[in-house]
Image (cartoon, helix red, strand yellow):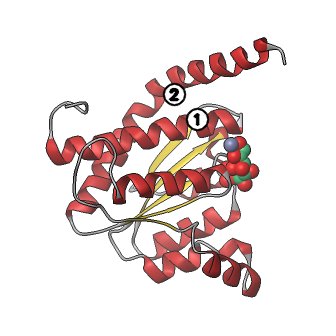
Amino acid sequence: MNNQRILAHFHESAEIKIQSATVLAQPIAQAIDMMFAALSNGNKILVCGNGGSAADAQHFAAELVGRFERERFPLPALALTTDTSILTAVANDYSYREIFSKQVQAFGQAGDILLAFSTSGNSGNVIAAIEAALEREMRVVAMTGKGGGAIGKLLTDADVHICVPAERTARIQEVHLVTIHCICDGIDVALFGGDAND
Ligand SMILES: O=C(CO)[C@@H](O)[C@H](O)[C@H](O)[C@H](O)COP(=O)(O)O
Ligand SMILES: [Zn+2]
């Protein structure tokens, strides 16, 4: 294997992260403020996405329920990607499009937040989840790329759109991951103040 190909991945990933930092700092800060306010008010965060983004959803929920870098009480976040009985029953009996939206209807309450991942912004089940969340007066934080797709058009001014300025799915996912860690850190700082590495 040619090392140049490997080096190119690292360089492209680093360059897109640097470019994204400038564009995304403001919406990421808005997402932190919105999530902290919701959690402080006793609300919860539901999280969804497909494939690598399903892993991102679970990663985020694990860091809220468990911990990020600081010792703290568990925070309520639920990945909608994990219950195979619900996922298979809904996909089998209704449609794959409804695997997340049915869970949003079951668990979501006004004031809760849906954190929705889709690198294309066009996954039907993520779109349906956002529609269900908006119907329930939840607010949405959407992490997308490739211009935001249909999801970008669906969001309201009350929602937050973190749209990575890139076209390649892998690179977009890599920026989503650092964004997840920014949000976890921001919530910890909002809770406890001070430097994230204290
Ligand atoms: O991780 C990857 C590609 O890097 C894949 O598993 C990827 O997440 C899947 O193709 C998803 O179905 C893509 O969905 P989306 O990001 O466009 O909503
Ligand atoms: Zn991937």
Residue occupying the point 54% across, 65% down: 130
- Expressed as whole percent of the image width and height from the top left, the position of residue 76 reads 33, 65
For image coordinates 72% across by 73% down, the residue present is: 96
* Alpha carbon distance from label 2 to label 1: 11 Å
What amino acid type should be assigned to the residue bearing mark 1? Glu
Considering only vertical position in the picture, is 61 above or below 109?
above
Count of marks, rendered view: 2
Q: Can residue 78 be seen in this view?
A: yes
Quadrant where ligand 2 appears: top right
Q: Position of residue 116 (x, y in %)?
A: 53, 57
In this picture, is 25 found above or below 124? Answer: above
Q: Is residue 2 left or right of residue 131?
A: right
Quarter of the picture holding the N terminus: top right
Residue 159 visible in the shown view: no
Q: Where is residue 189 in the image (x, y as percent from the top left)?
A: 22, 40
Left or right: residue 87 compared with residue 78: right
Residue at mark 1: C-beta within 8 A of ligand 2: no
**Residue at which label 1 appears:** 174
In this picture, residue 179 sits left or right of residue 94: left
Q: Which amino acid is tagged 2?
A: Ser
Residue at 50%, 75% (x, y): give it: 104
Q: Residue furthest bottom?
A: 93
The residue that appears at 21% across and 66% down in the rendered structure is 41
Q: Quadrant of residue 167?
A: top right
Q: Is residue 128 above or below residue 175?
A: below
Quarter-of-image position of residue 159: bottom left
First reached walking from the N terminus: tag 2 or tag 1? 2
In the picture of the structure, the residue carrying the numbered disc 2 is 20
